Image (cartoon, rainbow, N blue to C red):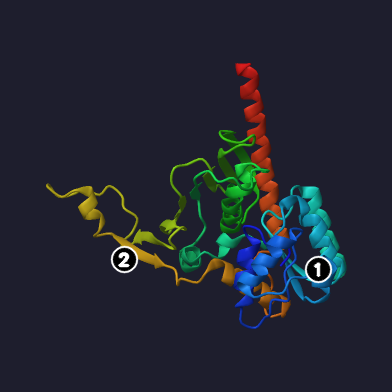
Amino acid sequence: MVGVGAFGRHHARVAQGLAGAACSGIQDVDRDRAEAVGRQVGVRVMRSLGDLLAASDGVVVAVPTSAHEEVARAAIRAGVHVFVEKPLAPDIESADRILEEARAHGVLVQVGHVERFNPALVAARPYLDRPLFVESHRLGPFAPRSLDVAVVLDLMIHDVDLLCSLVGRPVTGLAAAGVPVLSRHVDIANARVSFEGGAVANLTASRVSLSRVRKLRVWQPSGYLSLDLAVGKGEFYRLKNGVSVLDGVSLPEGVSALANLGSVVERVAIRGDGTEPLAAELSAFRDAIAGLAPPPVTGEDGRRALELALAIEQQIEDHVANTRAETA
């Protein structure tokens, strides 16, 4: 584990208890912090990145985004497989250098888009089929962390990655807006994304909300899926077997539309199995290193999410600049 701050310390905790693997050590530029985490989770602290890499088959890069390239490429040159926390890099050029070096050295790259492993989403996968409209809300109270980036790379990128993986088609249109509220970067953002084939998505992210919300809704030809990613459950609504598409239905007198809906629509409860997403994510990295399966979130997946997130961020920055110019 390189970097044991807000995210890295959780990686160290989970990795220490991971079956089929051993946590070789942790390293952080803040030696006192590394020592504290090492004592807490029972992992040895390495004096240098070189010492850590020499003792490892794979490494989790959980340093600030601005240092992802430096640490990831050092690991790659040492022949060590890399797991890079999201976002993959601060810009596309940096991401490309990481991926190019990984290809040249035959090293795996997995990106830490942990929501792919959310129990609710895992349980919902059998019901997902050609999403046509996706809506996400990722809202949270203000916290003095990750303020070196806008809310798009801090929070929305989770849903950008989910969206790209669900739709799986090229982006054809984008409209985005946002506002800085408590920091010098954008704190609340909204984006509308269109895809080849007709799918459309509406994404909202905020780090200045009063409550924590993690909602994902998907409309598709086979039904409607509503997931609460914060609690790991949801529902899927679809027409019952034997019921064709409703057309010109008239309701008997005295029967409400809501009451009649139950006679033609089936509700399927979606329940996750309670697996900690981070544990599932690191287990997948372990399996990828062992050659049992490819990384479920590849470096190319991380690059794709980063590219769209940066396009959203740029459009928002342009919107903010234009708004300031008009009010000056």
Of residues 134 and 40, which is closer to you in this image?
Answer: 40
Q: Which quadrant: the N terminus?
A: bottom right
Q: Residues within 10 Å of mark 1 (few under 14, many from 20)?
A: some
Question: What residue is shown at x 56% (from left), y 58% (from top)?
Answer: 166
Q: Residue furthest bottom?
A: 20
Count of marks overlaid on the render: 2
Question: What residue is shown at x 33% (from left), y 59% (from top)?
Answer: 244
SS at badge 1: loop
Q: Residue furthest left?
A: 254
Say the numbered circle drawn on residue 237: none
Q: Are marks 2 and 1 in contact (CB under 8 Å)?
A: no
What x and y, as percent, mark residue 38? 67, 70
Which quadrant would residue 207 be assigned to in this image?
Answer: top right
The disc labelled 1 sits on which kind of residue?
Answer: Arg
What x and y, as percent, mark residue 102? 82, 65
Of residues 141 and 321, which is closer to you in this image?
Answer: 141
Question: What residue is shown at x 21% (from left), y 54% (from top)?
Answer: 260
Q: Please give the residue where the numbered disc 1 appears in the rendered image.
A: 47
SS at badge 2: loop
Q: Residues within 10 Å of mark 2 (few under 14, many from 20)?
A: few
Q: Is residue 157 left or right of residue 46?
A: left
Q: Does 295 sit above or below residue 73?
A: below
Of residues 142 and 289, which is closer to you in this image?
Answer: 142
Q: Is residue 219 left or right of residue 178?
A: left
What x and y, as percent, mark residue 132? 50, 51
Which quadrant would residue 41 be assigned to in this image?
Answer: bottom right
Q: Please give the residue where the numbered disc 2 appears in the rendered image.
A: 242
Question: What residue is shown at x 60% (from left), y 58% (from top)?
Answer: 165
The disc labelled 2 sits on which kind of residue?
Answer: Gly
> How far, Cα to Cα, is label 2 from label 1?
66 Å
Q: Does 295 sit above or below residue 171?
A: below
What x and y, as percent, mark residue 147? 64, 43
